[in-house]
Image (cartoon, rainbow, N blue to C red):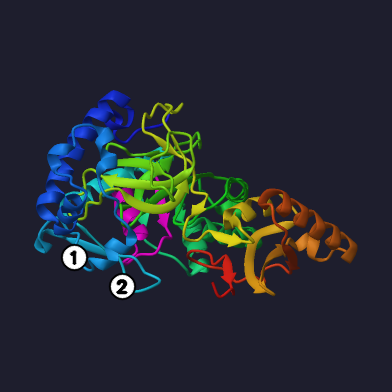
Amino acid sequence: MSKYWDTYHETMSREQLAELQLKRLKALVERVYTSVPFYRQAFQEKGISPGDIKSLDDLRKLPFTTKKDLRDTYPFGLFAVPRSEIVRMHASSGTTGKPIVVGYTKKDLDTWADLVARCMAMTGGTKEDVVQNAYGYGLFTGGLGIHYGAERLGATIVPISGGNTARQLMLMQDFGTTILTCTPSYAMFMADEIIAAGIKENIKLKAGIFGAEPWSNNMRLQLEEKLGIKAHDIYGLSEVLGPGVAMECEHQKGLHIFDDHFIPEIIDPETEQPLPYGQKGELVFTTLTKEGFPVIRYRTKDISVLYEEKCDCGRTHVRMERITGRTDDMLIIRGVNVFPSQIESVLLEFGETEPHYLLVVDRKAAMDDLEIQVELSSKMFSDKIAGLEVLERRLKERILSVLGISAKIKLVEPKSIPRSEGKAKRVIDKREL
């Protein structure tokens, strides 16, 4: 049985949860209608008023919120409290235009810390643990979100942030780090460095909390083997809260969404209609308890599936499948939808390659061309050419089987693909789309 941080809310019946959700949803709708001109106008355009929300099914009457809406109301247009009540602001890095700004009241920060403490407890974390936080600090929500959750748990936090891997490994040994938090790609980079330095026996890690980018179950297995840990997926996004929206327990059968604080939906991204449990689509969130920056039916662009069945850990929250990709970083190659995580999963089936790869997409003579650059393992790099040709053919056949399209496989020498100490850059798209 897992340890709980908040036994009452983590194990309450679905009926009790639904009652609490409805109460909080009604209060939320009333509050944003009164306090946020953007939502008041959006409700009026749909002919909706707060009094129309009488059941959880009425959620689908409410308008969606998109990333464009957040940018268009920059910087404070979606805040539901006076700016003087905002005690912290975070912002997305933003690849185009203005960043997305999110604000937190003191109560929001307390809620956030509690939810991340729930996540830590799911790993078996206690005040006896040393948490090495290699997520970036600053405007990105990852670093500070994890930081205050670990402190709320009572654990010792090492706020090292990302980068400086040699120092990471030194402190990991000297401080006796037991829980590592960072992106999975950086965790893999550190794992390789630990093995190369021959210091694995000095590492006391028992668990890892990895998120901020999609990763496959095969990568999880590799991390668990290389680091000797249980690797947990954590989910969150700045627009909804930050890390701590959902988390895997020790059974690793989906991430528990803390739906006493967030109502999740899965919609068909084309029709925008809600889909039933068990069907794959776009993940949508409504925040129930955020004061400073609440969002109604926020379209995350993340692709997932929701499951209602109770988990063996005893928690009753709805679970989400690990993110398989995003509708906005999905590649369409020769009419086929391709997610980098699908390719990663294939590559990790092969022991002769490393989990470092780069997808290069180009368009030649009006035809899309996909090249997958894959690092060979050190053992295979010295192999005979005939052996490499066999591996290349096997990889090509497996990719064709999984994706339904052919790709050129380019085997490259170990450590030749650039490493990242943050989110890994997996795709170079040269097409002019």
Residue topped by disc 2: 98
- In which quadrant will I find the C terminus? bottom right
Residue 88's place in the image compared with 310, above or below, is: below
- Disc 1 secondary structure class: loop
- Mark 2, Cα crowd under 10 Å, few <14 / some 14-19 / many 20+, is some
**Image position of 281 (left or right of 72):** right
Asked whether residue 258 is in view, the answer is: yes
The percent position of residue 342, horizontal first and vertical second, equals 61, 52
**In the image, what residue type sits under mark 2?**
Lys
Report the front residue among 343 and 432: 432
**Left or right, residue 309 beside residue 151:** right
Q: Amino acid at mark 1?
A: Phe
Closer to the camera in the image, 79 or 111: 79
Which percent across, then down, holds residue 204? 52, 48
Mark number displayed over residue 320: none
Query: Magenta segment, which residues?
Result: 129-152
Judging depth in this view, the residue of 91 and 192 nearest the camera is 91
Is residue 144 one of those drawn in magenta? yes
Pinpoint residue 369: horizontal percent, then vertical percent.
Answer: 68, 68
Q: Which of the 4 image quarters holds residue 39? A: bottom left
Residue at the (15%, 60%) spot, across then down: 86
111 left or right of 298 in image: left
* Residue drawn at (36%, 47%) of the image: 284
